[in-house]
Image (cartoon, helix red, strand yellow):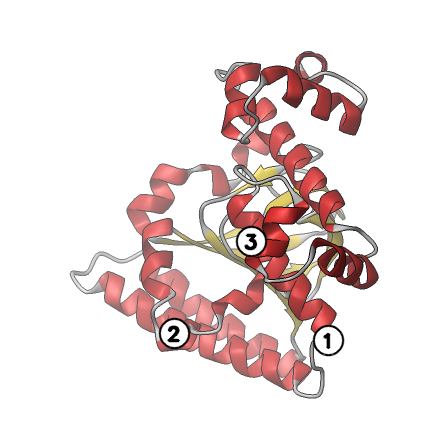
Amino acid sequence: MENYSQHPIHFQEHIDRQGVVVTEVKSLPSGERPFQSDNLVIGICLEGRADFMYDLLPRWFERHDVGVTLPNHIFSYSTVSPDYRATLIIISPAMYKGLIHRESFIDYQKYHNHPALTLTEEQFVHVHDIVQVLRHLCEIEHPRRAAMLENMLDILFYALTRYRGEKTATTANTRGEQLFNQFYDLLLTHYNRHHTLIWYAEQLHLTPKHLSLSIHRTTGKTPSEWIAEMLTEQSKRLLDTHRDMTIQQVAYELGFTENATFCYFFKRQTGMRPSEYRKRKE
């Protein structure tokens, strides 16, 4: 696997300046450590296989798979095969904010919990041709470059929406899956402010018992377990990547009003105090 710091997703100034970056990689952006990006990333697997945790669930990425990763989702515990190669289309936060209002990306929220699909050979060739044009546009200087990139991204998303629709036309989400999607969207947005089952149940206009039973029946975990795992992964991410933050600052960033409460929570989840975790990483 390539060095963690060399992965193109980390060159944020370049991504912000370009708006869209098309590049080929042989690794994922994280090993054990949790990783989160502010960018919209479209990955197309060319060869090999990658295995990883995505939003606390095990996932894999194989030849002809396409994954659309919206901002702020969590990668961790990734491994790749020696022959792994993928094309990444990395879209800056500013470009992403414009895209979500375009007709081609109108159902973008569906990618939160169903980020990937497998293309047929014919579909893969079509997508590959679109990406090659995108790659060319990324490399030119033109006063209308941003508009041209947006138009090509429209074509790409229209194609992906069509192919995904063909795969899922006969598959309807159960009520439990729909409820989990709503709960998880709330959790992604509010994990660092609200830690209780009661708050999430109120937002969904359900009793805590109803929400807990439904989520557990659908996923095998209770909402409280999902909340705890989200906080744990985000804690690790901050402790790993924000070395300048004190433990107390990390605690406040995650919505803990007392440092001692955060330390107790972290030790209960991981078996070590935050300071021990950080020292072990060193």
Instruction: Determine which quarter of the picture holds residue 144.
Output: bottom left
Neighbour tally class for label 1: few under 14, some 14-19, many 20 plus, Cα within 10 Å = few
Going by the numbered disc 3, the residue's amino acid type is Leu
Image marks 3 and 2: residues in contact by CB distance under 8 Å: no
**C-alpha separation, residue under disc 3 versus residue under disc 1:** 19 Å
Going by the numbered disc 1, the residue's amino acid type is Thr
- Residue located at (71% from left, 24% from top): 266
In the rendering, at what x and y percent does residue 95 appear? 33, 57
Is 116 above or below relative to 187? below
Residue that badge 2 annotates: 154
Neighbour tally class for label 2: few under 14, some 14-19, many 20 plus, Cα within 10 Å = some
Q: Earlier in the sequence, mark 3 or mark 1?
A: 1
- Residue located at (69% from left, 81% from top): 172
Is residue 16 in view from this perspective? Answer: yes
- Label 1: state its secondary structure: loop
Instruction: Determine which quarter of the picture holds residue 256.
Output: top right
- Residue located at (19% from left, 60% from top): 142
Q: In the image, is 204 to the left or to the right of 37?
A: right
Q: Earlier in the sequence, mark 2 or mark 1?
A: 2
Q: Nearer the viewer, residue 16 or 185?
A: 185
The disc at residue 134 is none
**C-alpha separation, residue under disc 3 versus residue under disc 2:** 27 Å
The disc at residue 174 is 1
- Label 3: state its secondary structure: helix
Is residue 65 in view from this perspective? Answer: no
Residue that badge 3 annotates: 186
In the rendering, at what x and y percent does residue 85 appear? 64, 54
Image marks 3 and 1: residues in contact by CB distance under 8 Å: no
State which quarter of the image contains the C terminus. top right
- Residue located at (65% from left, 75% from top): 119
